[in-house]
Amino acid sequence: MNDLVPDRLDKQWTRSAMAKRAGVAPTTLANWSERPHDPLQTIEASNGDALYTWRLLLNFCRGNPQLTATSQVLDRAEELFADASRDILESQRPPVGAATRTQSLPFSADARSSDGATLRSALQDLKTQVGEHSAVVAAATQLAADAAVIQAALVERLVQLEVAVDAAVGAGD
């Protein structure tokens, strides 16, 4: 933008904060940053930690459309910066076409890249998703078990109520 108005694309984020905003796992950003060829550029904080900006991330995604999750990051940026001027985001996005954009498809080393960091990133993302799914299944299972205990207690109370009503009605005859 200009010197007086900071550009939202240049705001610095920690890896976990940027990953959350970009819709990818923190390990994806770490793996992209550690690539031997054309890594994701970062900014070094005073404490030595790597900081990420949307501008650097979008430049990386634009330059590496063959990598898993880059199209997701670009799509997420469009959602987050919908109110930003179109020319800023369009300059950060590769031209749309079969050769440059990929959809989220199952990872195939020969079809995508033989880059070890990309494979590790895809596997870590899968592991994270499986872990999250397993946690939801475990919570649902626990909820079902709790509901069964409560239902059994309600049935027992209904039986006691019926016995009490029958006794009261029989005593009134």
Image: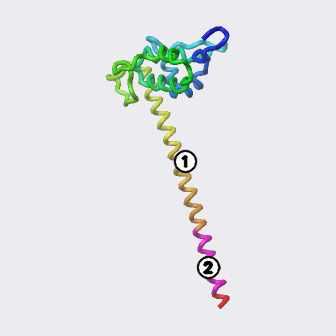
Name the kind of residue labelled 2 in the image. Answer: Val
Q: Does 158 appear above or below 83? A: below
**Camera-side residue: 51 or 30?**
51
Image location of residue 95, percent across then percent down: 40, 17
Q: Can you identify the residue that label 1 sits on?
A: 139
Question: Which quarter shows the C terminus?
Answer: bottom right
Q: Name the quadrant containing residue 148.
A: bottom right
Q: Is residue 82 left or right of residue 164?
A: left
**Camera-side residue: 34 or 9?**
9
Range shown magenta: 155-169
Question: Which quarter shows the N terminus?
Answer: top right
Q: Can you identify the residue that label 2 sits on?
A: 163
Majority secondary structure in the magenta region = helix
Q: Does 162 appear above or below 96? A: below
Q: Is residue 25 visible?
A: no
Number of callouts = 2
The residue located at (66%, 15%) in the rendering is 47
The residue located at (55%, 51%) in the rendering is 142
- Mark 2 lies on a secondary structure that is helix
